[in-house]
Image (cartoon, coloured by chain):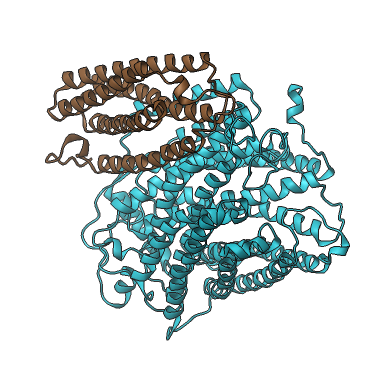
Amino acid sequence: MDFFDRFAVPHPSFLIYASMVGIGLTMLAIVVGITYFKKWGYLWREWITTVDHKRIGIMYLLSALLMLFRGGVDAVMMRYQLSMPENTFLDSQHYNEVFSTHGVVMILFMAMPFIIFFFNYLVPLQIGARDVAFPRLNALSFWLFFMGMGLFNISFIVGGSPDAGWTSYFPLAGNEFSTSVGTNYYMIAIQIAGIGTLMTGINFITTILKMRAPGMKLMKMPMFTWSAFIANVIIVFAFPVLTVLLAMGTMDRLFGTNFFTTDNGGMDMLWANLFWVWGHPEVYILILPAFGLYSEIISTFARRNLYGYKSMVASMVVISLLSFFVWAHHFFTMGQGPLANSIFSITTMAIAVPTGVKIFNWLFTLWKGKIEFTTPMLYSMLFIPLFTLGGVTGVMLAMSAADYQYHNTMFLVAHFHNVIIPGVVYAMLAGLTFYWPKIFGFMLNEKLGKWTAWLLSVGFVLAFIPMYITGLDGQARRMYTYSESTGFSAMNMVSFIGAAIMAIAFVLLVYNIYYSIRYSPRNIGSDPWDARSLEWATHTPVPEYNFAITPQVESTQPFWDSKKNGHQLFKGDIEKIHMPNNSGLPFIMSCIFFVFGFAMIFSIWPLAIITLIGILGCLAYRSFEKDHGRYISVEEIKETETRLRGAKK
Amino acid sequence: MKVDNSLPLEYSTEENNLKILGFWIFIGAEIMLFATLFTAYFTLENRTGNGPTGADIFEIAPVLVETILLLASSFTIGLAIHAMRLNKKKATMGFFIVTLILGAAFLGFEIYEFTHYVHVGAGLQTSAFTAALLTTLGTHGLHVTLGFFWGLFILIQIKKRGLTPETANKSFIFSLYWHFLDIIWIFIFSFIYLKGMM
């Protein structure tokens, strides 16, 4: 193949060219805008070099929202393609690329950064810490994730997107069947983002174990922090599997090794097994923090202590253990025999037990509570029935004998969207609405918020319930079109309408943000929801050092106790506070990683070697660097405190 | 920075404590990484295609030398940390230098071993077995290589800056890493080489 041929898109179409122009113009507009308003210095000092967990959190949030729309457009395109039989909107190759990127983007570049945004923003505040354990590593985590995301997203205009599904099973993902560079993008971009995520895991485990406020024993941590802790433990034990897996996949594609090939001893099922050894824990990395957010929200708006704190923790621990022993349920039909299938069937069904415990705990928290239906609470109340439905179909899929009927059909697609959307996405939106005033100092509009929640739910039911039916009737997933005689067209049309309604709901969310920025009152104080845990005990906006005096904790809800039961949170005097310095190194190193990734994807070896040396040089520089942080003086803290107290009213 | 003098130098500040715990967690991740590599290796061990088997290519002599070198280096880095705790800068540096020389010698033998494999027709592309073998060994070797340079940088810092809470902390963490690589090698020696030669 000629050198420049590799950069061409394998299936040029009007849509792709329009996107190229669109992306080019947007980039240009951003650069011109920043230059015009002279914001380069501000951007560099306050955001790019920041090591503040709150700002890094906000950057994760922006990335997640951006990717939500990218993945959402993919979703609507797919639903439109299937809404009519024999539709020619997308050709087969293009459709393959769209569903592959939709999966990767939504799981790894939307849901993951969204939960990591909550980890970053909330965990240090909930445990009364000044920052995470390794602030600079945290910045590096973010920038690596960001560059991985960027690399993955340029794939559809430079060289073509991955087209072997988000699972990239070999031999389909091998050189023989995936001839474009798309799958190289998959291997390398996810690798770079994954290294960032692994470091996030190490960072947060250390933070939670070592930096809790005095008196906050493990069993007195807020439920979200517990869920974050367990999710991060899963990250540390699951992501190395992905690292090795992607490295082997990269070697198969770039260096001609035979890990997953069909000759010279290669074993394609090794990929499927290892992928799900990481992949199944991965979905619990997403859902457990979502459960944590629901716990916070439900207890706040039922005005009650969370019911069954210990069983909540125990069930999360059990889920995290079981998550590593269920992976083969993703391929019951791929030949491992009745014994293995039975074992994995039973472990899978066993997960329903701790999950059921959690559902009942939420219901008992609501029991006799003074329930207040705010937007976050509305999401939580919609979550419980819809998620339970998804859980029940999950138990159906767990029955290995019956799975032969459902496997690779739309039934499965309906199931996992049914757990991920009401489970994770609702939690993200509920959490975003709940914590928005803490982060930005004003509330999102409640009326628009409730409209969004209802529209999203109506759209969700219309989009995904029909898939259960067509799936049982035999509509295979990932097929790009079907003939009219199959009889799937009506149901698929309903699905498309549902998807369109969901799209409208997301547009409404954006409008809500715009509307609230303009019209929402700013004098809301630091605790607008009358909440219970430490993150609400500091000022809004949260000062750089979080708490002027480290809070004292005696129960699971110290802030509530300080409001209602006379618990004294802040004892002692203000002392000078040690804070880390900003650093440009994480950003620069991640930029080099981006170029390195690009060079690897297109097999430009000299560039790959040069950038690799650059990365090692950054590590060496870091080793020799002397950086002892800085101190914020007592006067400065007092000044900030007075100013913020004044603003609070 | 608060320094607690009742603790060893490497544990004496809050930041140092965090770094040591963080590194233990990182070793947890590394265990998973090598566990995955071993899983892949054991799965593909007998899938040699048209290429040679382990029994055909393994030679005990260089492997034994490598093992002795690495085990000895693990011992000497332990001595270096012991000397560091006694606040003996020169002895610390001396044992660091011995460790690094042993590490470099190990790498030399491993490079020889790799060229030997390629020479007898067990290259990276030959079969699933050779790919898994060379990747597992290579990942370990890459860790040793990175460790070599990391150790070298720490050595230079001890020379320039003396035994401070910072350099002591770095040295201690480096020793954890080096011992860990040794343990991985014991697994490689037992379950790849010895098992393969039987």
Image height check: is A233 above or below A532? Answer: above
| Residue in front for this viewpoint, B134 or A70 | B134
The part of the image, by quadrant, that contains residue A258 is: top right
| Residue in front for this viewpoint, A443 or B65 | B65
Please tell me how many numbered marks the rendered image carries.
0
Which chain is drawn using brown? B
Where is residue A305? Give x, y as percent. Answer: 37, 76
Quadrant into which the C terminus of chain A falls: bottom left
Image height check: is A186 above or below A370? Answer: above
Q: Can residue A228 be seen by looking at this rendering?
A: no
Image point 23% across, 30% down: which residue? Answer: B168
Image point 30% across, 52% down: which residue? Answer: A209
Where is residue B87? Give x, y as percent. Answer: 14, 27
Which chain is drawn using cyan? A
Quadrant into which the N terminus of chain A falls: top right
The part of the image, by quadrant, that contains residue A611 is: top right
Q: Residue furthest front?
A: B198
Q: Residue furthest bottom?
A: A368
Q: Is residue A514 left or right of residue B36?
A: right
| Residue in front for this viewpoint, A353 or A345 | A345
Where is residue B123? Give x, y as percent. Answer: 54, 20
